Amino acid sequence: MGFDEKDFLACCGSSKFAMEMASAFPFKTLEDAITTARHIWFNKVDVHGWLEAFEAHPQIGKSPSPNQKSETSAQWSKGEQTTALATATGSSLLELSDWNAKYMQKFGFVFLICASGRSTSEILTELKKRYPNRPIIEFENAAQEQMKIIELRLAKLFSTKAESASTHDQQPMALKKKAEEDRVSIIGAHLTAPSQEPADKTSQMSSRTRPPITTHVLDVSRGSPAVGMDVKLEMWMDKQSRPSFDKTDIVSWVMQGFSTTDKDGRSGQLMNIVDSVNPGIYRISFNTGKYCPGGFFPYVSLVFEIRETQKSEHFHVPLLFSPFSFTTYRGS
């Protein structure tokens, strides 16, 4: 499985970043790649490189430019905005466009946010919250959001390459096609644009009013919602095996969505609103170390399974957290 500068340019629009990542290749695991990417992004890419990366992103709610450096990046950008577009109205898109213009005029670069799994209202709320910031603060915020996008896209890159290598080496043509269909059905809109979704899949997004998997975080040490905690949802993609106590293959976990808890401790949309969720094993991870730097847990991950007979059900998996303990349950 080999990567080049073009692959890493799809993960981040900075030429310096892509060159440094290609030079550092190969990586033993996705975790190694993310660690290296974080070091390169924050320590080797300069201000011009950050701005180059920001410029590669379309405004939220708008299609990527046809002149974008990477076709893969353009495709991923469209997929990452699927939830925002699915929850948008004509008035909310107009308001988002107006605020995007105000933000660009004040700061000189596009409003950047890891949009995967976020609704239009969530994005607008975050934009308005960040708009009063001083430019130096907002520049750092944009860089942090870019790093979240890099992590999400590196996971997609590793997953796509691993699938491609496996099907090429081991499967006849008929099985190749089936494996690709399975992969697309699982990763869904995170790898494809809304216009590429099958017609019957589009029609599924109607009866539910919220995604099949949701969470919220309660800080029991304070007796209040945990505000501002980063949350990500992943799915186990290796069809040949199951995750277990002895198997921690990071490459097999594929990001489905990323969000941050709001004032009520709710994470927003970590996946699309669909009637039928793909059966499989999922993992919700909470960045408790960032939220509570002095606590015992650097992060918390909750792993659970959705079976074929449960794909129409709702799965609410909350976290009750304190600096030295946590618990969870399946809610409603």
Image (cartoon, grey):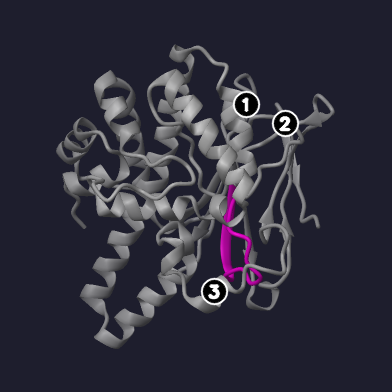
Amino acid marked by disc 1: Tyr
How crowded pointer 2 is (Cα within 10 Å; few <14, some 14-19, many 20+) is rated as many
How crowded pointer 3 is (Cα within 10 Å; few <14, some 14-19, many 20+) is rated as few
For mark 1, what is the residue? 291
Relative to 166, does residue 44 appear above or below in the rendering? above
Q: Secondary structure at mark 1?
A: helix
Residue 279 magenta: yes
For mark 2, what is the residue? 226
Q: Position of residue 191 (x, y in %)?
A: 40, 59
Which dot marks residue 272? Answer: none
Which is more foreground, mark 3 or mark 1? 3
Amino acid marked by disc 3: Lys
Q: Position of residue 38 (x, y in %)?
A: 35, 31
Q: Residue 271 is drawn in which quadrant?
A: bottom right
Q: Secondary structure at mark 3?
A: helix
How many numbered dots are placed on residues in this image?
3
Q: Earlier in the sequence, mark 2 or mark 1?
A: 2
Q: Is residue 240 shown to the viewer in this render?
A: no
Give the side of residue 325 with respect to residue 92, left or right: right
State the residue in front, 171 or 123.
Answer: 123
State the residue in front, 261 or 110.
Answer: 110
Residue range in magenta is 270-284
Q: Secondary structure at mark 2?
A: loop
